[in-house]
Image (cartoon, helix red, strand yellow):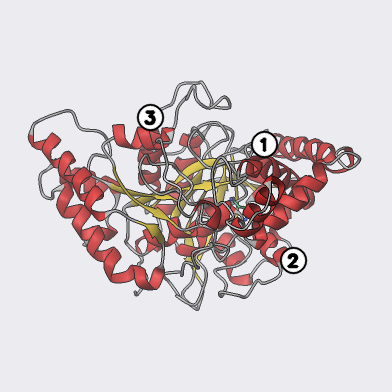
Amino acid sequence: MAAEIHYQTIATLAARLAAGELSAVELMQAVIDRTRAVDDRVRAFNSRDEADALAQAAASDARRSAGEAMGPLDGIPVALKDVIAVEGQPLTASSRMLADFVSPYDATVVKKLRQAGAVLWGRLNLDEFAMGSSTENSAFGATHNPWDLSRVPGGSSGGSAAALAAGEAIATLGSDTGGSIRQPAAFCGVVGLKPSYGLVSRYGLIAFASSLDQVGPFTRTVEDAAMLLQVLAGHDPLDSTSFTAEIPDYRAAVCAGPRSRRLGIPKEYFGAGLDPEVAAAVRAAIAFYAAQGWEIQEVSLPHTEFCLDTYYIIATAEASSNLARYDGIRYGHRSQSAGDVTELYEKSRAEGFGAEVKRRIILGTYVLSSGYYDAYYRRAQQVRTLIRSDFLRAYEQVDALLTPTSPMPAFRHGEKADPLAMYLCDIYTIGVNLAGLPAISIPGGFTQAGLPIGLQLIGRPFREAELLATARNYEQAHDWHQRRPNL
Ligand code: GLN
């Protein structure tokens, strides 16, 4: 499997760069060439700055030839979801509201990538303000799934997953509020990790629902996810919810293998609506772990049925508050036809936001309004505690949970026109965000029609090393992650 340069892993490319077999400029040029060849069909990027990326790559090569200390990602092109701030570059959240916005500063994760030597490459499409599961809600047009261009790449980080699957980056970053890293990773046949809440700084991430949002990596392998997480994780004084404990050596832990071997199967995650081919892939994975000597136990997460309702109250409430800042005055689109200041607010927001964002703002404002707060928002917070307790109780018996990532493989553009049908895509991913847990989606097979299937592994809080080791155990015995779409 001598993959083309644009399809190689971080681990391979970092070694090749270090050995002098390849320069960072050659690598960046290969990724640019590939992107030029396929992105008119995939449409993963909102914007990209080839000259800037090549200049960063040349700087990496110069550091290497001068014998300077090299970062762990030196010369590796990493593209970012267009909600992560890069100083001097556009930052749109795929919204008309921010169509002309240029970021005045770097997100903490961007600073960390720069320190690690990564080449920052382009901004990737998403559902507007990360609200959606298909990337069809982008104000700039939909992204296409590289495995079948008539289908969606998932969402909201659809551009991040599609770009990686199409060979338009070596790794990408996304954000996950209710599944937005894991579900597109599943739809596009790549690895997507949603870290524990608080492990990765949210400073410089455009806020959707602040108590749920996490930045995380999309990669081709679990080892690459460990390498990227190593760079991203860690305390940030600029994010008050950021975790303070020591960060382990993820790559070493992942390569050393899992320490425990008890896997839980939550029975509520195999209900009606689960596609039979997806269910079969998960059953095959359970059988694989059992054959490897893992102890498999059925567990129950009894409040699973309330996850979707709870999420759509909490996430919309937080969104209505976070998105209040887009008023056409401080930043964002400003209506040109307003007569007075109230009309300026109203028209700027009416023109700037798309339908799904408006739906969420209205719902979130409603659940927070006086008289309804106790009935909806407070109750949702109480149920959230019960949902988290379900997981913690399961972890008294097992060390990780195995589930489908998404109930179905990638669907066609336009297929889920009803918002509720779209929300149901998240039934297996949302509980993890409500509980603040780490979870990963890894390639777990293909349907007869050739669409990728994702397996989700959910870990204990802040035990990413163990989670990644568990995922790698499966990955090493299968070759799904080495298959490439025919583009
Ligand atoms: N699909 C979910 C939503 O629409 C989750 C989105 C996300 O994780 N950003 O809210």
Lateral position of residue 317 relative to residue 38, left or right = right
Residue 112: quadrant of the picture: top left
Which numbered disc flags the more N-terminal residue, 2 or 3? 3
Report the residue marked by disc 2. 272
39, 171: nearer the viewer: 39
What percent of the width, then of the height, locates residue 454? 52, 59
Label 3: few (<14), some (14–19) or many (≥20) C-alpha neighbours in 10 Å: few
Q: In the image, what residue occupies the spot 42% across and 53% down? A: 475
408, 38: nearer the viewer: 38
Task: Give me the C-alpha separation between circle 1 and circle 3.
Answer: 26 Å
Q: In the image, what residue occupies the spot 66% across and 55% down? A: 347
- Residue 43, placed above or below residue 236: below
User: Which residue type carries mark 1?
Assistant: Gln
**Ligand 1 neighbours mark 3 (CB distance < 8 Å):** no
Position of the C terminus by quadrant: bottom left
What percent of the width, then of the height, locates residue 39? 35, 68
Query: Which mark lies nearer to you, 1 or 2?
Result: 2
Number of numbered callouts drawn:
3
User: Which residue type carries mark 3?
Assistant: Asp
Report the residue marked by disc 1. 397
Lateral position of residue 249 relative to residue 286, left or right = left
Instruction: Say which mark, if any, is on residue 249.
Output: 3
Position of the N terminus by quadrant: bottom left
Which numbered disc flags the more N-terminal residue, 1 or 3? 3
Secondary element type, mark 1: loop
User: Do the CB atoms of the residues marked 1 and 2 lie less than 8 Å apart?
Assistant: no
Label 1: few (<14), some (14–19) or many (≥20) C-alpha neighbours in 10 Å: some
Residue 266 visible to the viewer:
no
Secondary element type, mark 2: loop
User: Which residue type carries mark 2?
Assistant: Ala
Q: Residue furthest right?
A: 371
